[in-house]
C-alpha cells in the first residue's frame, strides 16, 4: 500500500498544497493553492487557509504531512504570515495524530534536484519528471508543496519519520533518493 503524503508550502496570500501516493513511482493525487486576498482581515485569512487545508486533508486522507520550515528574511510581515500558517498546519497534524516532517528550503531542493541552491524552475522541472506530469504545476507554491511531499516520502517509510526511503523495483535508490541520502549524511557530519 502506498504512503499518502500532503506537502504544504505555507503562505498567507498563497498556501500551496500537494498530495502524492508514494510507492515505487510516486503519483500525483491532488495539487493546488488556497488563496486569500490581501485586503481581507488577517484573522479571516487564517480561517480561510485552515478551512481549505482541512478540506484537502478530509478528502485525501494523508498518512503524513510535510511542511517547509519558516526561514528568516528581511520582510517581517511575510515571515509572520508564514509562521502563523505553519502553526495552523502543525496544530492540524498534531490534532489528527498525523506524523509531520519539517524541511528547510535547501533540504527540499537538495532532495529533489541534488543541489540545495536550485532555483524554482529547476525544482518544478524535477517535480514534473518525478511525478511524470505533462507540465510543471503552477503556481510555484503548488510545485514546492509537491516537492515537500516527495522529499518526505523518501525520508519516511510507512509513516515512521527518519526511516529508510522506499527503494525502486530493482532495490536500488533512484538518483534523487541517493542525492537525498548523501545530503543527510553531509549535514550530520557538519554538526
Image (spheres, rainbow, N blue to C red):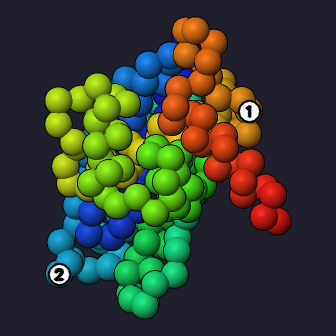
**Residue furthest to the top:** 170
User: Disc number at residue 163?
Assistant: 1
Asked which secondary structure carries label 1, the reply is: loop
**Residue 172 showing in the rendered view:** yes
Rendered location of residue 190, percent (x, y): 78, 64
- The 10 Å Cα crowd at callout 1, few under 14, some 14 to 19, many 20 or more, is few
Rendered location of residue 9, percent (x, y): 40, 57
What residue is rendered at 39% in x and 35% in y? 19
Displayed quadrant of residue 141:
bottom left
Asked which secondary structure carries label 2, the reply is: loop
Left or right relative to 59: residue 136: left
Q: Nearer the viewer, residue 35 or 140?
A: 140
Q: Nearer the viewer, mark 2 or mark 1?
A: 1
Displayed quadrant of residue 146:
top left
Which quadrant is home to the C terminus?
Answer: bottom right
Rendered location of residue 132, percent (x, y): 29, 25
Which quadrant is home to the N terminus?
Answer: top right
Left or right relative to 97: residue 176: left
Q: Nearer the viewer, residue 45 or 2?
A: 2
Above or below 137: residue 67: below
Rendered location of residue 107, percent (x, y): 56, 55
Q: Earlier in the sequence, mark 2 or mark 1?
A: 2
What residue is rendered at 74% in x and 32% in y? 163
Above or below 44: residue 110: above
Left or right relative to 80: residue 186: right
What residue is rendered at 43% in x and 90% in y? 74
**Residue 53 showing in the rendered view:** no
Above or below 27: residue 93: below
What residue is rendered at 34% in x and 61% in y? 119
Left or right relative to 68: residue 36: left
In this figure, which residue is indicated by the disc labeled 2? 39
Amino acid at each position: 500500500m502506498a504512503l499518502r503524503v500532503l506537502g504544504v508550502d505555507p503562505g498567507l496570500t498563497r498556501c500551496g498544497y500537494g498530495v502524492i501516493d508514494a510507492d515505487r513511482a510516486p503519483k500525483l493525487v491532488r495539487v493546488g493553492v488556497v488563496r486569500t486576498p490581501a485586503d481581507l482581515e488577517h484573522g479571516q485569512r487564517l480561517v480561510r487557509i485552515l478551512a481549505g487545508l482541512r478540506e484537502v486533508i478530509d478528502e485525501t486522507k494523508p498518512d503524513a504531512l510535510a511542511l517547509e520550515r519558516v526561514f528568516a528574511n528581511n520582510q517581517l510581515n511575510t515571515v509572520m504570515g508564514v509562521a502563523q500558517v505553519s502553526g495552523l498546519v502543525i496544530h492540524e497534524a498534531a490534532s489528527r495524530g498525523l506524523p509531520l516532517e519539517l524541511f528547510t528550503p535547501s533540504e527540499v531542493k537538495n532532495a529533489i534536484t541534488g543541489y540545495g541552491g536550485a532555483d524554482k524552475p529547476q525544482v518544478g522541472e524535477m517535480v514534473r519528471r518525478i511525478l511524470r506530469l505533462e507540465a510543471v504545476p503552477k503556481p510555484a507554491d503548488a510545485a514546492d508543496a509537491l516537492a515537500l511531499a516527495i522529499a518526505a516520502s523518501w525520508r519516511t517509510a510507512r509513516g515512521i519519520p527518519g526511516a529508510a526511503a522506499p527503494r525502486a523495483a530493482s532495490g536500488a535508490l533512484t538518483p534523487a533518493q541517493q542525492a537525498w541520502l548523501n545530503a543527510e549524511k553531509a549535514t550530520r557530519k557538519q554538526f
